Amino acid sequence: MFRLSMAVLLAALMASTPVAAETRVGVVDLRQALFSSSDARAFSEKMQQDFAGEEARVREAQDTARKLKERLEKDGAMMNESERSKITTEFQEKVKEFNFLKQRLDSTVASRKQQFLEDARPEVDAAVKELLEEHDLDLILPSEAVVYAKPDMNLTDELLEKLNR
């Protein structure tokens, strides 16, 4: 029984080998193509403009906290207890403010990036489908899933051209 099942498995593997050799495959780096596109560059510039004020507030809170910490480290031993306590409290409040502002900014930026990716998905899918048809491919794999591919199988530049149209 074991020999029969092994023989069937071996026959199935041998029969599928020629099919695999006929499969035409392409590879693309979706992330590189998408984030190098003109739409992505415009999105990035808009994000920098939109969040310049918030980034400045985050940096200001960080600088203030750093200066308070340096002051405590430098002059803390010479300060009286109430002054040291006051500066320590200010430092802790600035750290909390920095953490809050940074977390809020990071969350908003991540949300906007996710929305950009979702909005770009139909365009990317259409461009990948065009590549599939133009090159008469059976399969296009993301480069992250591939250990090695011949350079002529990499269609990332062509995908980028399609996205920039």
Image (cartoon, rainbow, N blue to C red):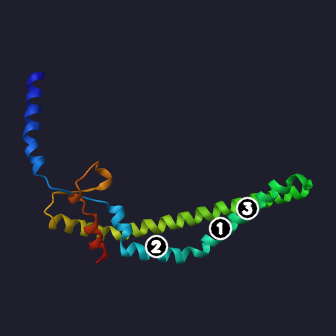
Q: Is residue 117 left or right of residue 1?
A: right
Q: Which residue is mark 2?
A: 44
Q: Which residue is mark 1?
A: 59
- Element under label 3? helix
Q: Quadrant of the N terminus?
A: top left
**CB atoms of marks 1 and 3 within 8 Å:** no
Towards the viewer: 78 or 87? 78
Q: Quadrant of the C terminus?
A: bottom left
Residue 138 in percent (x, y) is at 15, 57
Q: Which residue is mark 3?
A: 65
Residue 61 in percent (x, y) is at 69, 66
- Element under label 1? helix
Amino acid type, callout 2: Ser
The residues tagged by marks 1 and 2 sit, at their Cα atoms, a distance apart of 20 Å
Q: Is residue 13 above or below residue 158?
A: above
Mark 3 neighbour class, 10 Å CA radius: few under 14, some 14 to 19, many 20 or more: many
